Image: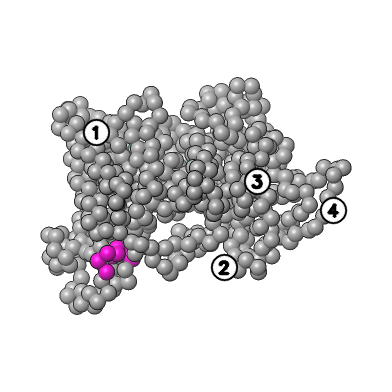
Amino acid sequence: MAGTGSLRRKAQESLGILKSATISHSTQTPGSSSENIMPSVTLPERNGSVLAQKPNFQRKMSTPMMPSFMVSAPGKVIVYGEHAVVHGKAAIAAAISLRSYLLVSFLSKKHRTVTLRFPDIQLEHSWDLDELPWDTFSAPGKKRSYYDMVTSLDEDLLKALQPHIQAVSPSLPESKRKIHQSSASAFLYLFLSLASRKTAPCVYTLRSTIPIGAGLGSSASIAVCLSCALLLQIRALSGPHQDQPGKESELQIERINRWAFVGEMCIHGNPSGVDNTVSSGGKAVFFQRTDYAKPPLVKTLYTFPELPLLLVNTRQSRSTAIEVAKVAALKKAHPLITENILDAIGHVTESAHELIASPDFDASSPTALKHLGDLITVNHGLLVALGVSHPKLERIRELIDHTGIGWTKLTGAGGGGCAITILKPQPTAPNGTADSHTNGNSLSPPTSSEEEDSSSDMDCSASIISTGTKLKHKILDRLEVSLEKEGFEKFETTLAGDGVGVLWPAVLHNGNEEEGGEEIDQEKFLMAEGNEGIEKLVGVASSGRRGRRGEREEVREGWKFWRPWEGGA
Ligand SMILES: Nc1ncnc2c1ncn2[C@@H]1O[C@H](COP(=O)(O)OP(=O)(O)O)[C@@H](O)[C@H]1O
Ligand SMILES: C[C@@](O)(CCOP(=O)(O)O)CC(=O)O
């Protein structure tokens, strides 16, 4: 425990987290010598106490260490339109509440290293700060500013990074080494572009609750975390804070997103940009690319409902490129039929978009939810017709359909990966009757006594996952057992939540501002067990309240988010 109440306030004030600070001039030239310099009068110590010092205007003060801080960014699911989006139709993708968390801790000046600790992929690597190719990155014509829009990776910069990337996990088998080196190259490219050789020695520790390589945007979420952390370190961001005008929040998100895209390019080569856009801004986006020579049309859907979502991972690895190629081959063999299927998927997305964007859209209306749910079912059928499902995805859909709890589709490239289910206000059996007991399947719908138990508190306007019915718990519990028995992994998440967020300093107060708080240090963060352990440590908890659609409201103690939809003009 550390007495960090005022430390947190000081740190926030000095770095513009509490105030609507205008961007400091030092950030106009990232890498200037003013990086990491705290106000000259109050020096926070590592143990959290604050020493009052006499201002000394003659001699330059030594630079105190910054307190550690944390950033976090969500994963995503494609809700409608995957594959068709490759052929010029629109898609809708939304943020999910599975997230990556990045802790930035500072070392004393005698350490001249920067370290990555990425235990999810068993990566731990340090570079000597003085050996990195700063000169190449700051050469005339190569130096980039924090507000630049970088749309391709520079060959000369990549070449200069090569020896430093090759030094990462050289003795691991090719497949593991590639994962390590992708993450390392995303970090190094951003670090050398945004920081400077005078940057304080530090350690970046990352943990994620997003399954890796399952189409849920894990890479984009780490790219967003790295971009946000580095931009904060060079003071190129204002906020997030409560009264921030919407336009200003949008600008900060855009700034983070631009550099996150650069990180995604390091990992993926040619990303579409949708994952990092959703992860930076949260909520959902409408996304369309008709001409690959031009930037895509990306519209944030601030009114996309925060729906509870069931997410099931097949644990079947798949390759997006192979699935995309399958559709291309089908189109070549059966052009008219395939075009019609892709068109139909485009119409599904348009129909969802029209509903959500209409001025009288009421996200709590069961009719609106049914409209969105029916589109999920149709979209899945069309993806099956394109040949991108997988027996495991069909098995998951079958198990969930037999419970009648929601509308299910594959999400992302297919061929494995994940399925998503939007939950119904009230469970219906496969034949469409509410709670009827047709079966013969391993997963039985509830018995009539269970139904009686629950009928008194059944609330048709709220989601089954969030009403306190015994029925709900029984169905979900049984489903979990069946899914686990067959090797699948189930997550209960929420759609369309916050984008990138900041916890500065990395201290949780557990509701008590005056008594200081508990610092999240590297060791505690590394030791946290599983997704639950990570979320508990970083302050994610249920508020005990329910939102308008009956969803359980989540609180993230101390965390701040840029929320353009809440801010004024
Ligand atoms: N938790 C993590 N820690 C470190 N690197 C990660 C993590 N999650 C993702 N990555 C990086 O992102 C890559 C996964 O990207 P990809 O296969 O496209 O999966 P996804 O579809 O989940 O984005 C990994 O190879 C790794 O380089
Ligand atoms: C199939 C596709 O539409 C989505 C792939 O999504 P993911 O790689 O599974 O996240 C391909 C794309 O949009 O680039």
Tell whether circle 3 marks a residue whose Cβ is less than 8 angstroms from ligand 1: no
* Badge 2 element: loop
Indicate the secondary structure of the residue bearing disc 4. loop
Q: Amino acid at mark 2?
A: Gly
* SS class, disc 1: helix
Q: Amino acid at mark 1?
A: Val
Q: Is residue 476 left or right of residue 2?
A: left
Q: Percent position (x, y) of residue 530? A: 46, 59
Please give the residue where the numbered disc 1 appears in the rendered image: 327
In the drawing, what numbered circle is on residue 202?
A: 3
Q: CA distance from mark 4 to mark 2?
A: 33 Å
Q: Secondary structure at mark 3?
A: strand
Viewed as shown, does residue 535 lie left or right of 395? Answer: right
- The answer to whether the beta carbon of the residue marked 1 is less than 8 Å from any atom of ligand 2 is yes
What residue appears at the point 69 percent right and 61 percent down from the top-left corner? 6
Q: Position of residue 369 (x, y in %)?
A: 26, 55
Contact between marks 4 and 2 (CB within 8 A): the answer is: no
The mark lying in front, picked from 1 and 4, is: 4
Residue for badge 2:
511
Distance from the alpha carbon under mark 1 to that under mark 3: 46 Å
Rendered residue at 75%/59% (across/down): 50
Q: Where, by quadrant of the figure, is residue 33 drawn?
A: top right
Please tell me which of labels 4 and 3 falls first in the chain: 4
Region rendered in magenta: 459-466
Q: What's the residue type where badge 3 is placed?
A: Cys
Q: Which residue is mark 4?
A: 54
- Please state, as top left, top right, bottom left or bottom right, where the N terminus lies in the image: bottom right
Pick whichever of labels 1 and 4 is earlier in the sequence. 4
Tell me if the residue at label 4 has its CB under 8 Å from ligand 1. no
Q: Earlier in the sequence, mark 1 or mark 2?
A: 1
